[in-house]
Image (cartoon, rainbow, N blue to C red):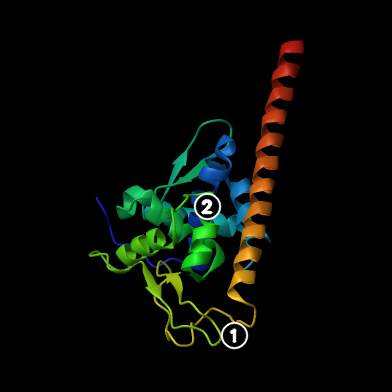
Amino acid sequence: MAMNSPELSLLEARIVGVLVEKQHTVPDIYPLSLNALTAVCNQKTSRDPVLHATESEVQAGIDRLRGASLVVESSGGRVMRYAHNVERALGLPSQAVALLAAMMLRGPQTVGELRINCDRLHRFADGSAVEGFLNELAERSAGALVVMLPRLPGSRENRWMHLLSGPPADLGGEVGVTAAPRRVDDALQAAIAELRHSVGELRDEIASLKTALARLSTSQESGDS
């Protein structure tokens, strides 16, 4: 059954966004351990803002998210691992969850930026498909989960932000978001976002390959002994 979401801190929203992302990009190591989850929460690329959370802070965030049924725990192996439960807890389709995750990881974005940054989580056919799910999230009967922000000076498109951490105090000023007027052409911004996406994809593939090689090495050592 869908439920209203509690107001999440910046770190709690980042934890949820990271778990959604890694479910799709590194399925071999998902669900994530506390150590891995802390590392990706503090990742310096494809994150806005960059965080510097400790394991104890991430654990406290996990505990609160578990209480809200947004994160679930699994005890397979020697360490506890964590997975998101957003679709079931909030009654949302996977496409909507992908959009929320992109905003939790990178902050407010235009429809074009969201389409590019969601590509590894869900491949939207075009911008109108993205807009359709954003409008559903904004008009949700249980409470809006996204809002369209006023257009910034020099920008051709409005940006969208998630409301899982509460509404901005001033939609005109976007409290908590530092953003200078965009002087870079929108096409260049899209190209930069696509390049960052490609680099992130390569990083995830390398991490997945390292994990597979480590498991193979461990298996061979066990066989030799």
Question: What is the C-alpha distance between the residues marked 1 and 2?
Answer: 26 Å
**Disc 1 crowd, CA 10 A, few/some/many (<14, 14-19, 20+):** few
* Apparent side of residue 15 relative to residue 193 in the rendered image (left or right): left
For the point 48% across and 77% down, the residue is 157
Circle 1 SS class: loop
Q: Position of residue 25 (x, y in %)?
A: 57, 44
Q: Amino acid at mark 2?
A: Asp
In the image, residue 157 above or below residue 10: below
**Can you see residue 176?**
yes
Circle 2 SS class: loop
For the point 69% across and 47% down, the residue is 203
Q: Quadrant of the C terminus?
A: top right
Q: Amino acid at mark 1?
A: Pro
Q: Position of residue 3 (x, y in %)?
A: 28, 57
For the point 56% across and 30% down, the residue is 77
For mark 2, what is the residue? 119
For mark 1, what is the residue? 181
Residue 216 has which mark? Answer: none
* Apparent side of residue 210 relative to residue 28 in the rendered image (left or right): right
Q: Position of residue 136 (x, y in %)?
A: 30, 63
Disc on the earlier residue, 1 or 2: 2
